[in-house]
Image: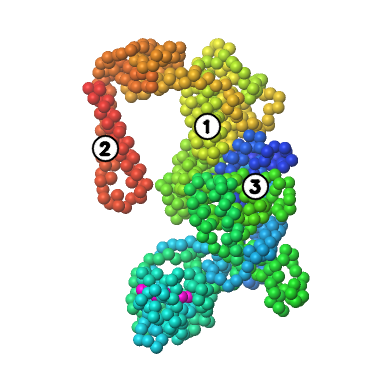
Amino acid sequence: MILDKHYNHLESEPKWYEIWESKGYFKANPESGKPGYSIVLPPPNVTGSLHLGHSVMTVVQDVLSRYKRMKGYDVLWLPGTDHAGIATQMVVERELAKEGVSRHDLGREKFLEKVWEWKHKNGSRITKQLRCLGTSLDWSRERFTMDEGLSKAVKEVFVSLYEEKLIYRDNYIINWCPRCQTAISDLEVDYQDKPGNLWHLLYPVKDLDIKLEIATTRPETMLGDTAVAVHPDDPRYSHLIGKFAMLPLMNREIPIIGDAELVDMEFGTGVVKVTPAHDFNDFATGKRHNLEQINVIDETGHINENGGKFKGLHVLEARKVIVEELTSLGLISKIEDYSHSVGHCDRCKTVVEPILSKQWFVKIEPLAKPAIEAVETGKIKMIPEHHKKTYFEWMNNIKDWCISRQLWWGHQIPAWYCHDCGEVVVSRETPLKCTKCGSSDLKQDSDVLDTWFSSGLWPFSTMGWPEKTPDLMKYYPTDVMETGFDIIFFWVARMIMMGIKFMDDIPFKTVYFHGLVRDEKGQKMSKTKGNVIDPLEITDEFSADALRFTLAMLPLQSRDIKLSKDWIAGYRNFINKIYNATKFALMQFDEDKVFEFNPSEYVEDNFSPVDKWILTRLEETVEKVTSGIEEYRLHDSAAAIYHFFWHEFCDWYIELIKPTFFGDNEDEKSVARRVIIKVLDVSLKLLHPFMPFVTEELWQHLPFTFDGKDESIMITPFPEKNAIPSFKTDADNFEKVLEIIKSIRNIRSENNIKPSQEIKAYFVIETSDVESIVDERKEYLNKLARVSEIEFRTNYEPDKNTASSKVSSGTIYIPLHGLVDFSEEITRLKKELARIAVDFEKSDNKLKNPKFIENAAIQAIEKEKQKHAEFLEKINHIKERLDGLN
């Protein structure tokens, strides 16, 4: 029963995690007979390491999982990792480059062997790190997006969609990353505003002495122009429709077309160059007008053979040379400085090239309609609700999804090409011959599927689909998907579409989005700024429990979540408070004597007023914590138990109950022991989902036993409100006494009255019942406020040397004669006023400095304004005190 002097999280946390996992507490059991509750962990990249985004995600999901387990549910929290196609291939290629070897030197088969070797060696790093946070994941069901079962699911989905003509292959304009050497989806393009130029090019009209002025930010793409477009209603140019322009430098005739969708006659010159192979809008225009598609940029970002004499030049070099030649020919009318949005690869930050390419696509609109309806009807709930607007905007304007990637690591597309007749054979199994001509000369498509294709199946593929497994039957649909709002399109929308399509049901009932974790100033964390908080360093220094509780206390539903290391240190102090309070309670019991008591079967007892107060507040806290978790307001739950334990239990109850424990009345001690153990038992259970380690450590030391006592706090029933005795009226009355005690303490503090000095107080009452309420509890006024006598009045005329304080039931007056040395207090306050005045003046000058206001971050200005207001408030308060004393 005896606790060590200090809590050692470095010993406790790994010890308890090993015990929990070895005893199988994390495992789900579809045959348990309990109601099911399930969450699939958003799979972190196999290349990744634990960061704060993962920490927020896992803390939320672990709180929900531990809470539901304690509420009697059979919980499946399913872990896994994503193969992360581009990222993993890049990591392994970099390792090979150190040896002077490329993947092409090895060939596909040998290269993939190297990737699997790397995965087996390094791929479990993040799952080991997740254990450090105390995640109660069912590791026996851990999945990987390229394991055998998930690969089978991916093939089944691809072939099924192909058979329904929802997957097709076509030449289409796509985003191409020259560095990653693959197509990427629209969602993987990061648009950044960059300074550049707007070149005004002149295109001669054939057989007419006219030049059309066209503005562009990418002169090099003109090599692939196949038309010039004007608005058909534009009186300046409509007469030119049907004629031809001469494409400068290429000496190629291109038609002048009228297109109202592409051209805004009020914008720019009203003339637009059309490059169908290198611009998404131009591609659509080319389709409408049956224009030739000429690709002039290759996969490495260089001009290809279609670019004539500019072949081999990098696009930026070609831009420079083309501008020089056009200038020499007098075909550039002007060059303007121009800031515009430039697409970059989200992974490697290389400028993306829109190019024409033959790729595989999913026809997405038929899949999107039921997914939109599921959210519109409330079948899927989104928290916070405002994310629905973003979801609908994207889903209602959705484009077909390019799913092929020019990589080797990933799910190779299950399509084979016949060398003899060109037939495309799509199959779940490797075909032996062509279905059209019977040839056995087949070659599989070398591309792999977009990583998000396999992860879009995650909620059901991880449970054994396409087989009808017991897990799938019980745990699908899952209860909640908790993730960052930034992947609502990448992943959440695709899971909804795929789940409804292949399971004929939604994949989850609720989507809970957390915000982006930033530093305390609201800045995004980055290594260059030096403001990154490493979760594993935090768990080593402050404990996993402190980090978990800090994250739970944050407003997770906000778009931006500001985090300070000081807050984590503060919640480590809370852990110490919990530990010391438990240690004090254990000291009230015989060291080796077990308390024969079942705290879940509490019986009526001869409770003191303070017992009734703390038990009632405990019952209220159970309700607040429970409703907060159920409604995904974790910060409300965490705040409720924090306030109760620190401020009500430790600051008040323990102080009020000490005289009982130090006294000689054994009956009162017996009742107090039962109450303090009850409060600790319930409090530790309420805290357990947030702080699993320290609560297990302390709960194991609680000195009670009964038949059927659980081995671990994590499998005990979560506290129920009605299981705790409640005395609402008595508790409210006692609260009035505590309010009076707080007011008197404040008066004592403000006037530097010695703690040992007893005082007399006058109470002018405003409610009829307060006199009897206070009179019955005078002992607490003496214990905690050192009030020797309190006199009730209907009115009181204080002199100038009387302090007062307003409370809800009246006004407290305390004469200060004999308690305060007025001259000494005046001197002290004047010194304090002078000191604060200096700080106030510094802050005031800073806020009046235009340079500070112009250059400082908004957060710094707001912080300075707050300090300024606090200084002013203190100055006014001291002046009021001095006026009173004078």
The mark that comes first in sequence, 2 or 3, is 3
- Residue 184 is situated, as x and y percent measured from the top left of the image, at 55, 65
Q: Which residue is mark 1?
A: 624
Q: Which residue is mark 2?
A: 838
Q: Which residue is mark 3?
A: 477
Residue type of the residue flagged with mark 2: Val
* Magenta extent: 269-275
Residue located 50% across and 38% down the image: 635
Question: Disc 2 to disc 1, how far (Cα)?
Answer: 44 Å
Give left or right: position of 878 versus 419: left
| Secondary structure beneath label 2 | helix
Look at the image and say whether residue 368 sits in the magenta stretch: no
Residue located 41% across and 75% down the image: 232
Q: Nearer the viewer, residue 195 or 102?
A: 195
- Categorize mark 3 by other alpha carbons within 10 Å: few (<14), some (14-19), many (20+): many
Residue type of the residue flagged with mark 1: Lys
The mark that comes first in sequence, 3 or 1, is 3
Residue located 39% across and 14% down the image: 768
| Secondary structure beneath label 1 | helix
